[in-house]
Amino acid sequence: QVQLVESGGGLVQAGGSLRLSCAASGRTINRYHVGWFRQAPGQDREFVAAISWSGSSSYIADSVKGRFAVSRDYAKNTVYLQMNSLKPEDTAVYYCAASPYTSGFAPTGPYDYWGQGTQVTVSS
């Protein structure tokens, strides 16, 4: 079982930036494909970004392209979602998800493991 832990959420003004982190509790995340999703109140969960375990492939949803970026730091055993030029419509709970490297990389899922989520609130 892999326990994912997101951090870095919070309250930010429109136009600001946040960087979310995703780590695996008690083990390395380095051999997992990782995706980021978000869910706003009353809305379906939405794919945001994903990165392959090797880092050679990454995808960003059209809705956030040019503003968000996904990366990973193998030394720190962490995957990041850098969010710039935030808008009120980016307000949501953000989740990271992971699947082992032995699985093919499918950016939008399905994923085997999910974190508890971190709240991002963008004020206008």
Image (cartoon, rainbow, N blue to C red):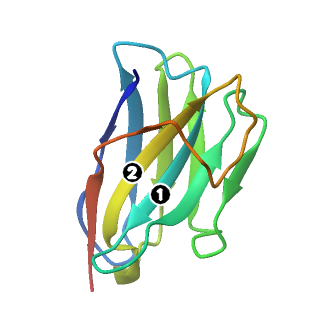
Label located before the other in sequence (1 or 2): 1
Given the image, on which type of amino acid does mark 1 rest?
Phe
Q: Image check: 12 left or right of 43?
A: left
- Residue 9 in the image: x percent, y percent? 27, 53
47 vs 79, nearest the viewer: 47
Tag 1 near tag 2, CB within 8 Å: yes
Task: Tell me which residue sits at (46%, 20%) in the image.
Answer: 76
Q: Image check: 37 left or right of 108?
A: left
Secondary structure category for the residue under label 2: strand
Label 2 Cα crowd, 10 Å radius (few <14 / some 14-19 / many 20+): many
Task: Tell me which residue sits at (42%, 72%) in the image.
Answer: 86
- Residue 41 versus residue 93 in the image, above or below: below
Quarter location, residue 54: top right
- Residue 21 in the image: x percent, y percent? 39, 40
Give the CA separation, mark 1 to mark 2.
Answer: 5 Å
- Residue 71 versus residue 121 in the image, above or below: above
Task: Tell me which residue sits at (39%, 75%) in the image.
Answer: 15
- Residue at label 1? 37
